């Protein structure tokens, strides 16, 4: 329970369904001894208090679990390391994979709990073959299957997602009906750990080696400007490039080893295929090989029709139509009929 309305309503819905519910809030950021500096904490005192007040209202126990080391290793260090590679990380996916659905599920098993439940907007279904899978939520705008693609059969069998069959307004209505104090609490919009300074300021204060200057280079190899760190850029970005050319330029590639940012015009951002690594299959791997799928290349993207060809630990994805700004480090998630079949991390476009 993060202190937000979704997880709070999820607890209420589970009580309605007859479950014996306890509320758990993860203390992830930071320890007093941490050298990491942040202007706003994840799971702040206010958020913990909100979660505790909800649990008091629902008359269920509330516990705070120390997950600081897990979060530092699997989310913060990952965040820095991806930028060191010139890739654009997705910390929310890393947190789901390693903290919420690995460490927390392990702790839940130690405590004798049968399930872990969250406020994510997704539904768990059983396929005709008897496998469990994620299906898009009722609220397409809030659907979060993209950030849960890494879940396997064992995790799905011990997971409950009560909000998956509701829209966001309906979830707020549930919270209000139960008199929960946070039913009007706004959604968090940014990365939970970077604060008001933004991710660039957070990186400058905590990972100085990323603040390495380099060149901005056009498609002809001409140096047209300088930058003070590749972490300021991601593929497809236009912001910050307006002063270097009369033409509208976008980031087309990042060379981390040489701290070089390559730029070009909009048409140079389109690709027909990409390689995806670190594959995870929610359903049988055989279903994905040479499969037709809808592929999302970022959280906010629409699915694009493609063919997925497996090759060992990676996959080549061939799109029917060119896709814009395929970004290394982001997740590629494969869907069939609103059901997640698998996904992985984008390595490069072709």
Image (spheres, rainbow, N blue to C red):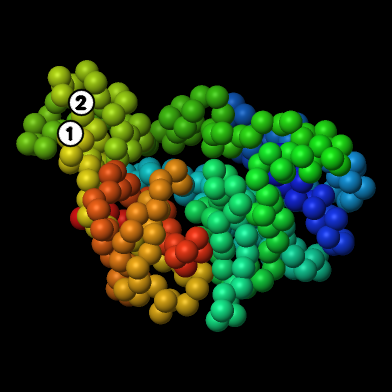
Q: Nearer the viewer, residue 314 or 286?
A: 286
Tell whether 183 sits left or right of 276: right
* Residue in the picture at 29% in, 37% down: 236
Q: Is residue 51 visible?
A: no
Cα distance in 3D space between marks 1 and 2 = 6 Å
Residue at numbered disc 1: 265
Q: Which mark is residue 78?
A: none
- Residue 141 placement (x, y as % from top left): 54, 43
Give the quadrant of residue 294.
bottom left
Q: Residues within 10 Å of mark 1 (few under 14, many from 20)?
A: some
Name the side, left or right, on which 43 lies relative to 227. Answer: right
Q: Is residue 28 above or below residue 211?
A: below
Q: Residue at x 63, y 64 (%)?
A: 124
x, y (%) of residue 131? 58, 77
Instruction: Please give left or right for residue 207 compared with residue 271 in the image.
Output: right
Write down the residue under mark 2: 248
Nearest the eye: 109 or 296: 296
Relative depth, front residue between 81 and 301: 301
The location of residue 24, given as percent across then percent down, is 77, 51
* Left/right of residue 77 with respect to residue 15 in the rendered view: left
Residue 199: % across, % down: 47, 32
Quadrant of the image occupied by residue 250: top left
Helix, strand or loop status at disc 2: loop
* Labels 1 and 2 touching (C-beta < 8 A): yes
Q: Earlier in the sequence, mark 1 or mark 2?
A: 2
């Amino acid at each position: 329970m993060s202190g937000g309305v979704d997880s709070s309503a999820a607890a209420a819905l589970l009580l309605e369904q007859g479950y014996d519910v306890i509320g758990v809030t993860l203390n992830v950021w930071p320890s007093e001894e941490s050298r990491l500096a942040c202007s706003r904490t994840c799971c702040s005192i206010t958020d913990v208090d909100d979660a505790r007040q909800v649990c008091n209202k629902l008359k269920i126990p509330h516990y705070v679990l120390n997950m600081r080391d897990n979060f530092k290793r699997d989310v913060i260090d990952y965040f820095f390391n991806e930028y060191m590679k010139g890739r654009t990380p997705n910390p929310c996916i890393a947190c789901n994979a390693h903290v919420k659905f690995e460490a927390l599920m392990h702790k839940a098993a130690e405590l004798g709990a049968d399930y872990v439940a969250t406020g994510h907007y997704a539904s768990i279904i059983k396929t005709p073959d008897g496998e469990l899978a994620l299906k898009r939520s009722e609220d397409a705008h809030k659907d979060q299957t993209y950030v849960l693609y890494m879940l396997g059969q064992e995790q799905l069998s011990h997971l409950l997602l009560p909000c998956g069959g509701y829209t966001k307004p309906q979830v707020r209505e549930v919270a209000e009906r139960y008199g929960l104090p946070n039913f009007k609490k706004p959604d968090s919009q940014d990365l939970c750990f970077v604060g008001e300074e933004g991710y660039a300021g957070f990186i400058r204060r905590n990972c100085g080696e990323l603040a390495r200057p380099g060149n901005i280079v056009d498609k002809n190899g001409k140096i047209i400007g300088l930058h003070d760190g590749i972490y300021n850029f991601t593929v497809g970005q236009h912001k910050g490039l307006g002063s270097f050319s009369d033409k509208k330029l976008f980031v087309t590639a990042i060379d981390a080893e040489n701290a070089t940012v390559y730029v070009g015009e909009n048409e140079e951002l389109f690709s027909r295929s990409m390689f995806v690594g670190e594959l995870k299959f929610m359903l049988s791997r055989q279903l994905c090989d040479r499969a037709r799928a809808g592929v999302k290349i970022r959280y906010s993207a629409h699915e694009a029709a493609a063919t997925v060809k497996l090759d060992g630990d990676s996959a080549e994805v061939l799109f029917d139509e060119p896709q814009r700004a395929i970004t290394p480090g982001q997740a590629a998630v494969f869907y069939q009929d609103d059901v997640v079949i698998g996904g992985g991390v984008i390595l490069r476009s072709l």
